[in-house]
Amino acid sequence: MAAYYYTVTTIVTVGYGDILPRNIPERIFSTLLMLIGVASFGLATGYLASIITNYDSSQAILKEKYQTLYNLQRQYRISGELFKKLVKTLHFNHNKMLKDFDQFMSELPYRLRIEVAMEIHKKIYETVVFF
């Protein structure tokens, strides 16, 4: 049990500290606590990364739509008043779509949410050599 405790302590990189477990129940408890801590940290980090990725991709889509709108304004000399209406509509529709998507994703079970996020962002992570 001592060897297993030190193996887990080393792998999860929590260090050996000044207070050490002295008997088997303390080592078992410490080992379980470290494993739960690492799993919780990993899940939280993954969820945060998913949120950031969703936000970044939605902002890229919005910027692309704005760029198209600006190009149309320059090319067809759209009046300022009509252009402002178009920008407001574009922004409103984008925010509505984003809220609907966020609500949909938040209502999914965790594993299914991860699968959907991975499928949605497949093109992004396929281009990264690390993944």
Image: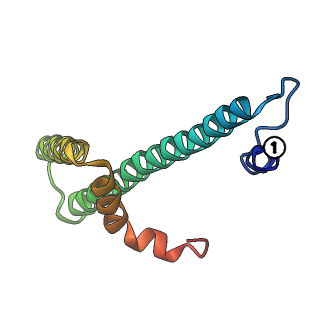
Report the number of numbered marks.
Answer: 1
Q: Nearer the viewer, residue 60 or 112?
A: 112
- Which residue is tagged 1? 2
Furthest residue toward right: 18
Image position, residue 45 (x, y; %): 53, 44
Q: Is residue 101 left or right of residue 21?
A: left
Single out the residue that lies furthest toward the top. Answer: 19
Residue found at the very far front of the displayed protein? 24
* Disc 1 residue type (three-letter): Ala
What colour scheme has been applied to the protein in the rendered image?
Answer: rainbow
Q: Nearer the viewer, residue 68 or 98?
A: 98
Give the image location of residue 2, x and y in percent: 81, 43
User: In this rendering, does residue 67 appear at all?
Assistant: no
Q: Horizontal and vertical percent for residue 47?
A: 44, 46
Q: Quadrant of residue 36?
A: top right
Task: Judge whether 24 appears above or below 49 on screen.
Answer: above
Q: Is residue 17 shown above or below 94? A: above
Residue 97 visible at all: yes
Q: Nearer the viewer, residue 25 or 108?
A: 25
Q: Is residue 9 left or right of residue 93?
A: right
Q: Position of residue 12 (x, y in %)?
A: 71, 46
> In the drawing, does residue 52 fall left or right of residue 72?
right
Q: Quadrant of residue 63?
A: bottom left
Task: Classify the position of the C terminus by image quarter.
Answer: bottom right
- Judging depth in this view, the residue of 58 and 54 nearest the camera is 54
The local secondary structure at tag 1 comes to helix
Please tell me which residue is depicted at 20% across the width and 43% down the height of the picture.
Answer: 107
Residue at x 15%, y 42% (from the top left corner) = 96
Image quadrant occupied by the N terminus: top right
Q: Residues within 10 Å of mark 1 (few under 14, many from 20)?
A: few
